[in-house]
Image (cartoon, rainbow, N blue to C red):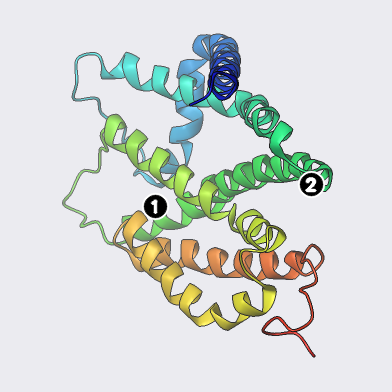
């Protein structure tokens, strides 16, 4: 490696370090106010489950420090989500110098749309999926069983579902980026639609609990969002040169 190339490589590493530090500082700053409302944040997250429990039932904590540790984890996740737009901006600012001018114009809208869609996925999961799934599960609980979910298991379940639905709602952005960069055409995306539908149900079966309701609530939006991505991608697809497969001579 030449001296100039080495200096360029090191400068990129230093810039990456600086932007990672800024992102971490932003997360810590957002975590601090969440820390003081950790208990309230936990109650907010637990609300969908508490509404489906029998009257008088409560969650339990089997670990000694779990009642403190789980609310702190929720506060940290909340801090990360509040800082997410700034974290994504730092990622965009790092790669922006290597983009063409037309790509730079699209990069910021993609960052904003990615953030909005991720939050929409979480909101859909919280306000619709949790209530539906928990009520469905509660109908199968024998009357002789006293339901008292462990708060750590509940947190892990909720976090996994939030990530699953947040990432699922990013499908339109992924489709648009693939088409915008020329890696795949809109026509090809239409051709593989049936495979995507099968894949959506396989993914839903893997990342959701083993019940039909939650799997459908993930797979169906994934398929619909794929169609939304195809629709939007039509407006950003680059025209292919004449003579290339799929174009008229």
Considering the image in quadrants, where does the C terminus appear? bottom right
Residue in front for this viewpoint, 53 or 240: 240
26 on left or right of 241: left
What residue lies at 79% left-to-right and 81% top-to-bottom? 242
Judge whether 195 appears above or below 228 on screen: below
Quarter of the figure with residue 178? bottom right
Q: Residue furthest left?
A: 144
Residue where numbered disc 2 is placed: 106
Judge whether 139 appears above or below 108 on screen: below
Q: Position of residue 185 (x, y in %)?
A: 66, 72
Find numbered disc 1 in the image and state the secondary structure of the residue it sits on.
Answer: helix
What residue lies at 66% left-to-right and 40% top-to-bottom? 115
Residue where numbered disc 1 is placed: 134
Quarter of the figure with residue 110? top right
What residue lies at 73% left-to-right and 65% top-to-bottom? 233
Q: Earlier in the sequence, mark 1 or mark 2?
A: 2
What residue lies at 25% left-to-right and 28% top-to-bottom? 60
Q: Gap in Å between the C-alphas at discs 1 and 2?
A: 40 Å
34 on left or right of 65: right
In front: mark 1 or mark 2? 2
Q: How many callouts does the rendering have?
A: 2
Of the numbered discs in the image, which one, if any, rests on residue 225? none
Residue 88 shows up from this direction: yes
Judge whether 208 appears above or below 26 on screen: below
Residue 208 shows up from this direction: no
Find numbered disc 2 in the image and state the secondary structure of the residue it sits on.
Answer: helix
Judge whether 226 appears above or below 35 on screen: below
Q: Position of residue 163 (x, y in %)?
A: 46, 43
């Amino acid at each position: 490696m030449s001296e100039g190339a080495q200096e360029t490589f090191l400068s990129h590493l230093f810039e990456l370090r600086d932007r990672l530090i800024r992102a971490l500082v932003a997360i810590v700053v957002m975590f601090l106010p969440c820390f003081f409302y950790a208990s309230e944040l936990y109650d907010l997250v637990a609300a969908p489950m508490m509404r489906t429990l029998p009257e008088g039932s409560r969650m339990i904590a089997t670990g000694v420090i779990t009642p403190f540790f789980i609310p702190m984890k929720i506060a940290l996740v909340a801090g990360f989500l509040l800082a997410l737009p700034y974290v994504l901006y730092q990622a965009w600012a790092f790669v922006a110098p290597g983009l063409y001018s037309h790509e730079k114009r699209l990069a910021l809208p993609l960052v904003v749309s990615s953030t909005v869609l991720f939050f929409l996925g979480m909101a859909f999961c919280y306000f619709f999926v949790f209530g539906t799934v928990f009520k469905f599960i509660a109908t199968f609980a024998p009357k002789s069983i006293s339901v008292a979910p462990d708060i750590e298991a509940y947190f892990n379940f909720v976090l996994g579902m939030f990530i699953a639905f947040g990432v699922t709602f990013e499908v339109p952005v992924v489709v648009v980026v693939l088409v915008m960069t020329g890696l795949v055409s809109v026509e090809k995306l239409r051709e593989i639609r049936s495979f995507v539908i099968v894949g959506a149900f396989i993914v839903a079966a893997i990342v959701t609990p083993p019940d039909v309701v939650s799997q459908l609530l993930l797979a169906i939006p994934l398929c619909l969002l794929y169609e939304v991505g195809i629709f939007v991608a039509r407006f950003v697809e680059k025209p292919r040169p004449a003579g290339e497969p799929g174009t008229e001579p």
